[in-house]
Image: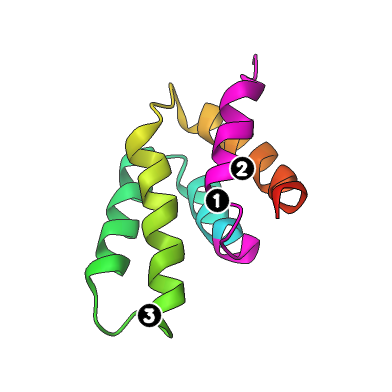
Amino acid sequence: MKIDFGTVEKIAQELQDIDPNELGKVFNYLRATKNIKKTRDMLTRFIGSPNFSRSKQTKRYYEAINDVFRNYKFSSAEDALYTLGWARRLMKYYK
């Protein structure tokens, strides 16, 4: 699998202000389901649920992650996992 590090860097910069643990939770869900559509549906459900968010910040984190899934067209769940995994590693360098 060839990783587009330009895309990885863009995503890391876009997500630099979110808690990496929240991205990790989405990453783990995607890894378990291996299904991008299910992951996007889960994010949409969480964002729309008044009972989900512990704070406004948490909702903002999930909105930002959802934006990544909307704006970047991953060719497969594996592609998304590699890209998001690298982006998560790089996020701390953009803070």
Q: Which residues are magenta?
A: 1-22
Q: CA distance from mark 1 to mark 3?
A: 18 Å
Label 3 secondary element: loop
For residue 12, the mark is 2
Q: Earlier in the sequence, mark 1 or mark 3?
A: 1
Residue 78 is situated, as x and y percent measured from the top left of the image, at 55, 30
Q: Position of residue 72 (x, y in %)?
A: 41, 30
Which residue is located at x 55 percent, y 51 percent? Answer: 15
Query: Any magenta on residue 20?
Result: yes
In the rendered image, the residue lying farthest to the right is 93
In the figure, 63 relative to 31: above or below?
below
Q: Which residue is mark 3?
A: 53
Q: Classify residue 56 as left or right of residue 16.
A: left
Q: Residue at x 25, y 64 (%)?
A: 45
- Locate residue 62, reporting x and y percent: 41, 61
x 45%, y 75%: residue: 57
Question: What residue type is disc 1 on?
Answer: Leu
State yes or no: discs 2 and 1 in contact (Cβ < 8 Å): yes
Residue at image x 31%, y 41%?
37
Q: Are marks 3 and 2 in contact (CB under 8 Å)?
A: no
Return the mark for residue 15.
1
Instruction: Inspect the image, locate mark 3, and give the three-letter code of the amino acid beneath it.
Output: Ser
Most extreme residue toward the top is 2
- Name the mark nearer the viewer: 1 or 3: 1
Q: Quadrant of the N terminus?
A: top right
Image quadrant holding the C terminus, namely bottom right
Note whether 70 is above or below 23 in the view shown.
Answer: above
Location of residue 22 by image quarter: bottom right
Front in this rendered view, residue 33 or 19: 19
Does dot 1 land on a helix, a strand or a loop? loop
Residue type marked 2: Ala
- In the image, is residue 95 part of the stretch drawn in magenta? no
